[in-house]
Amino acid sequence: MTDFKEQAQLTMDEIFNLVESEYEDFEVDFEEENIRIESLKDKSVFIISMHSPTSQIWLSSPRSGAHHFEKSLSNSSQWVSTRDSKLELFDLLKSELSQ
């Protein structure tokens, strides 16, 4: 398994566990390299995918649209947006799931 796949898989596991333990208004499913998070309130769906060709994690959000995240060069535990380096995957996801 490549370094990207190992790191991305760990991150995907963290996201799955976070949603499952902290957000009871969401149903979360993990299939292959995708996580599907569905709101039980309004049926909105978030999709998080590992994208190996670009070594990125992609987020499709019903609240803010599409985002691509790369491993941070300064903090190996963070995934930062390719459009805005101040935007971090977990911070954005937590914010949007809390809305």
Image (cartoon, rainbow, N blue to C red):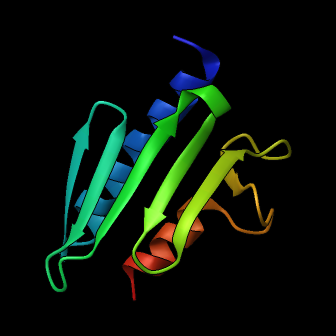
Q: Estimate the x, y position of residue 45 in percent, counting from the top left.
A: 28, 68
Of residue 13 and residue 60, the one placed in the foreground of this image is: 60
- In the visual, does 15 lie left or right of 2? left
In the shown orientation, is residue 82 left or right of residue 13? right
From this viewpoint, is residue 78 visible? no
Q: How many numbered dots are placed on residues in this image?
A: 0
Name the residue located 27 percent from the left edge and 54 percent from the top edge.
36
Q: Name the residue furthest bottom.
A: 99
Which residue is more in the foreground, 12 or 53? 53
The residue lying toward the viewer, choosing from 42 and 8, is 42
Residue 66 image position (x, y, % from top left): 54, 64
- In the rendered image, which quarter contains the C terminus? bottom left
Q: Position of residue 87 (x, y in %)?
A: 70, 68
Q: Position of residue 31 (x, y in %)?
A: 24, 36
Q: State the residue lying farthest toward the right.
A: 74
Residue 39 visible from this viewpoint: yes
Quarter-of-image position of residue 85: bottom right
